[in-house]
Amino acid sequence: MGQLAGPTDPTADAHWEHTHPRKGFFTDTSICIGCKACEVACKEWNHNPQDGNLELLGSSYDNTGALGASTWRHVAFIEQGQERIAEARESGRALVNLGMPRIGPPADAAPDLSEADRTPPDTADFRWLMSSDVCKHCTHAGCLDVCPTGALFRTEFGTVVVQDDVCNGCGTCVAGCPFGVIERRSDGTVAVAAEREEQHAGHPAVPNVGVAQKCTLCYDRLLADETPACAKACPTTSIKFGDHDDMVETAKERVATLHAQGMTEARLYGANELDGVGGTGSVFLLLDEPEVYGLPPDPRVPTADLPQMYRRAGMAVAGMVAAAALAFWRGRA
């Protein structure tokens, strides 16, 4: 277990002999059209089964509902009216007015956005918010920290991957994820990636009952210097893939552009290395508050509290030892 909180470089912390720049996604929800090509590409590449009978949920036109053991990319459909759109723009403007750090290039390379015209365009009567969600590949990953078998590991690209042949299905990682991403597969349909070539050759699928599953950021494709399947399939470039630092800079520039156009509802999620998970490998541009998308507003990895818990436990033990020693001394007196 490495560093539990604060800014850090997860690729260096993993102590690989040969490291690479940290890889990650930038998901720009402002240009997502909800086509679900990323969902399909993810399932096809990883041989993930479908989720049930794909019936409409009743609460949305979406038919998968959420991330899970068989859905490593999920596109949410969020319907909003004029009133909610106006509220989103006001909350975004409040973030800027409260002293949000400067977004975009240095002052000598671009105009000061604090002086830009942020008058919003005419508020639409209706809009869909499409958001392609995925594992965050956190800087401080709760699932990785609490795994008792070493089934989860940090790759040389800074991502977090589950080794399904090592996982014992205990489910500790499920509770350790502040985003509710990782889940245990219960249908026992197919294994992923490791036996792909054998399955293509006609060998039977390998049962995977109870094994924890989540996005690997297409680790097998990264090893071959290939783009992850979801980003490759995205027709609008809503899902961008590259070096993590480059993705964060691209995301900040995109937010600055939208703010300058009056779309004050635009904001970043996961780009703050001082948050409760040290920033995420998957950065998002949102057009409303995180809760609207089903994301925690202030994610915090559970293991961040371990040092304080150890100190308190140590103080409690010391107190009990002192009390026992005092009782023994009084008994001898």
Image (cartoon, rainbow, N blue to C red):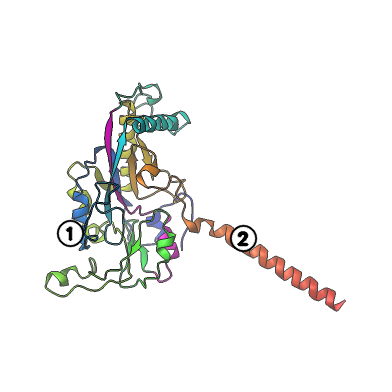
Q: Residue 311 carries which label?
A: 2
User: Mark 2 falls on what kind of element?
Assistant: helix
User: Mark 1 falls on what kind of element?
Assistant: helix
Image point (22%, 66%), residue name = 193
Residue 123: give x, y in percent of width and height: 30, 26
Q: Nearer the viewer, mark 1 or mark 2?
A: 1
Residue 214: give x, y in percent of width and height: 31, 60
Residue 143 lies in the magenta stretch: yes
Q: Residues within 10 Å of mark 2 (few under 14, many from 20)?
A: few
Q: Which of the 4 image quadrants contains residue 143?
A: bottom left
The residue furthest front is: 58
Which amino acid type corresponds to the residue marked 1 in the rendered image? Answer: Glu
The residue furthest left is: 201
Image point (25%, 45%), residue name = 240
Which amino acid type corresponds to the residue marked 2 in the rendered image? Answer: Arg
The residue that label 1 is drawn on is 44
**Residue 227 in view in this figure:** no
Which quadrant, please, contains the C terminus? bottom right
Q: Which of the 4 image quadrants contains residue 229?
A: bottom left
Part of the protein shown in magenta: 124-150
Image point (36%, 65%), residue name = 152
